[in-house]
Image: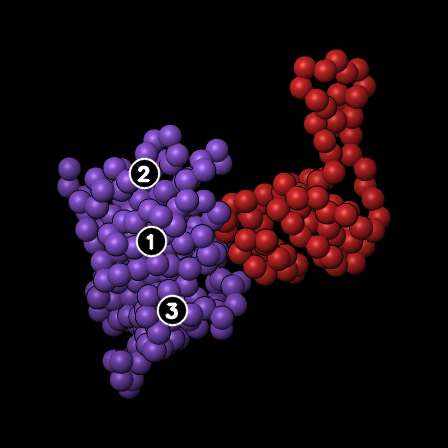
Chain colours: A purple, B red
Amino acid sequence: MTAISPLSNIIKKGLFGDYENKNENDLVKIKELNDLLIVQIVQYQSSKLEIENLKVDNINFSREALTTACNDNTRILWFAPRNWMLVSKKKELINNVKKTFNDSDFAVTDLSQSRTIIEICGKNSKEVLKKGCPFNFNILKKNMCLNSIFNGVTITIDLIEENPDRIRLFALRSFGESLYHSITDASLEFGYKID
Amino acid sequence: MLHIKCPHCGLRSQNEFSYGGDGTIKRPELNKEISDQDWNNFVYNRKSPRGKHVELWQHISGCRQWIKVQRDTVTHEIFQTADVKQDIK
């Protein structure tokens, strides 16, 4: 099956907003990410397994709230107690995940086709998010993740890099267009570039 | 706007939460005969206290967990929050 990205018919590449007379490095850069593996892993309440002993792509799972365990290809986001979201460039990892997490202890769900992923880069990335999200972004550090809302849309935020900030936003696929327009509206004053 | 401290995620805005009603209501024991009046009280009748009150909230746009919140219904001050399995005294 050919995967059609949620924003493929909406995104128009170029420079927008207040971008004139500004260095391109100072603009907010927005792009849609697709072709990533997204898997939700939930450990049942009855399960006695120690999740810290399990590894996927050489990454250990963490019970620490709001943290992301990662390497160059894969990121494992803490979602809630006993609940994680794995995001990876390696699509074949799904087989490994299904082998590692047995049916009696875990619910493994492939969400790859049901999420929109928008990546925002630039020194004003947090300022853009502050306009629609009530979270205190001053405490957001590298490899932290959280669930919150942006203008009423439930999103997952993952800070990948700092200085300049590179932030990934995940939303339900059906809310992708609404989220995209909210993000671009909030970026107008800084000037933004769509890649 | 209220700020509620989720026991899992930390201090968050009320916008991320959904109110879930009185946190002190206990379901009648399973398979135990109870009167229609008791069942009616469990399902429909709620007190509307003035002052400290234990409530259920769900962190619907966060970790999606149910939590207990002790809140003053007059001042909206929040004294304590806890996981839904824990008791608030």
Relative to B75, does residue B49 appear above or below in the rendering? above
Which residue is label 3 attached to?
A: A142
Q: In which quarter of the image is residue B49?
A: top right
Q: Which amino acid does label 1 sit on?
A: Asn
Residue beneath the point at 73% across and 34% down: B25
Count of numbered marks: 3
Query: Are the two marked residues, 1 and 2, in contact with CB atoms closer than 8 angstroms?
Result: no
Earlier-in-chain disc, 3 versus 2: 2
Q: Could you tell me how far apart the alpha carbons at marks 1 and 2 are, in whole angstroms?
A: 13 Å
Which residue is label 1 attached to?
A: A60
Q: Nearer the viewer, residue A138 or A188?
A: A138
Determine crowd level at label 3: few under 14, some 14-19, many 20+ residues with C-alpha closer than 10 A. some
Q: Which of B18 and A77 is in front in this view?
A: A77
Q: Are marks 1 and 2 on the same chain?
A: yes
In this image, A86 relative to B29: left or right?
left
Q: What residue type is labelled 2?
A: Phe
Tell me if I can see residue A176 in this picture: no
Q: Could you tell me how far apart the alpha carbons at marks 3 and 2 are, in whole angstroms?
A: 28 Å
**Picture coordinates of residue A144, whole percent (x, y):** 41, 63
Earlier-in-chain disc, 1 versus 2: 1
Relative to A99, does residue A144 appear above or below in the rendering? below
In this image, B36 relative to A35: left or right?
right
**Picture coordinates of residue B74, whole percent (x, y):** 81, 54
Q: Nearer the viewer, residue B51 or B83?
A: B83
